[in-house]
Amino acid sequence: MVREKSKYYNLEEPLHVYVVADASVFIWGKRPSGELITVPAVEAELKDIRTRSLLAIFEVRVESPSPQARKAAEEGARETGDIRALSTADLDVLAKALEYGGVLATDDYALQNVALHLGLKIEPIGQPRIKRIRKHIQRCRGCGSRFEGIACPDCGTPAPKKKRCI
C-alpha cells in the first residue's frame, strides 16, 4: 500500500512513515499521514481542550529526544544561525525527527530551514514551505568582520543580522 499523493516526498515510500509533529499540527487540526510522534514540550504548549484532545484523537506518541539528537539539533541550528529563533520545543521536535529520520510536520520557517539544512524531509501544515535554505550571518558595520554574538569582538559595534541564501 502506498501513501497519499504529496509533492513533498516520494510516493513509492511505504505507508509506515514516522512524522514528528510540531504544535502547528494540532493548532490547524490537520493530521499528516504516518505514525505521529511529538515531544513533551509540544504537549505543554497545547493549552486549550481542542488542541489537547487532538493528541488522543490522532493517536500521538509523546517521547523525549535523546541527548545526542538534541546536541545535533542545536549544532544544526547554530550552523544556520536560527538558534535564537527556535524554542526549546522546536529544538526537541527537530531532535526527535533526527532520531527517527522521519518527516518533520511544521509551519515554523526557522524550524523548516534547519531541518532542510540537516537533510530532513518537511511537511508544511497550513503555510507554504520555505523556498530556499537560508544561513543567517552577523557582519560588523564598523570593521566588516563576521562573528557570533551581539557585538563585534574586534571593535565592539553591534551588528544587524543579514540573510544569505546558500
Image: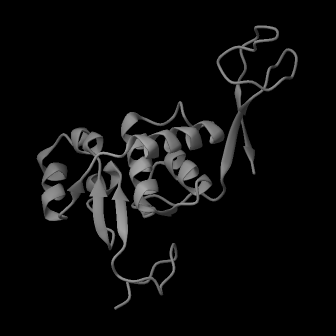
In the rendered image, the vertical position of residue 136 relative to residue 51, given as above or below: above
Task: Residue at 43% x, 48% y: name it.
Answer: 95
Judged from this view, the residue extending furthest toward the right is 143
In x, y percent, where is residue 155?
81, 8
In the rendered image, the vertical position of residue 156 relative to residue 87, given as above or below: above
Q: Please indicate whether residue 96 sits to the left or right of residue 137 in the image.
A: left
In the rendered image, the vertical position of residue 147 relative to residue 31, given as above or below: above
Judged from this view, the residue extending furthest toward the bottom is 1
Question: In the picture, residue 48 is in which quadrant?
Answer: top left
Q: Please indicate whether residue 131 sits to the left or right of residue 17 in the image.
A: right
Q: Which scheme is used to colour this image of the protein?
A: one colour
Q: Please indicate whether residue 66 sits to the left or right of residue 78 in the image.
A: left
In x, y percent, where is residue 74?
52, 38
In x, y percent, where is residue 127?
46, 58
Q: Please indicate whether residue 82 sits to the left or right of residue 64 in the image.
A: right
Q: Quadrant of the N terminus?
A: bottom left
Q: How many marks?
A: 0
Between 22 and 47, the residue placed more toward the observer is 22
Question: In the picture, residue 162 is in which quadrant?
Answer: top right
Task: Residue at 54% x, 34% y: name it.
Answer: 83
In x, y percent, where is residue 147?
74, 24
Question: In the picture, residue 47 is in which quadrant?
Answer: top left
Is any atom of residue 64 visible in this view? Answer: yes
Is any atom of residue 30 visible in this view? Answer: no
Judged from this view, the residue extending furthest toward the top is 156
Task: Residue at 46% x, 48% y: name it.
Answer: 108
Task: Residue at 31% x, 49% y: name it.
Answer: 23
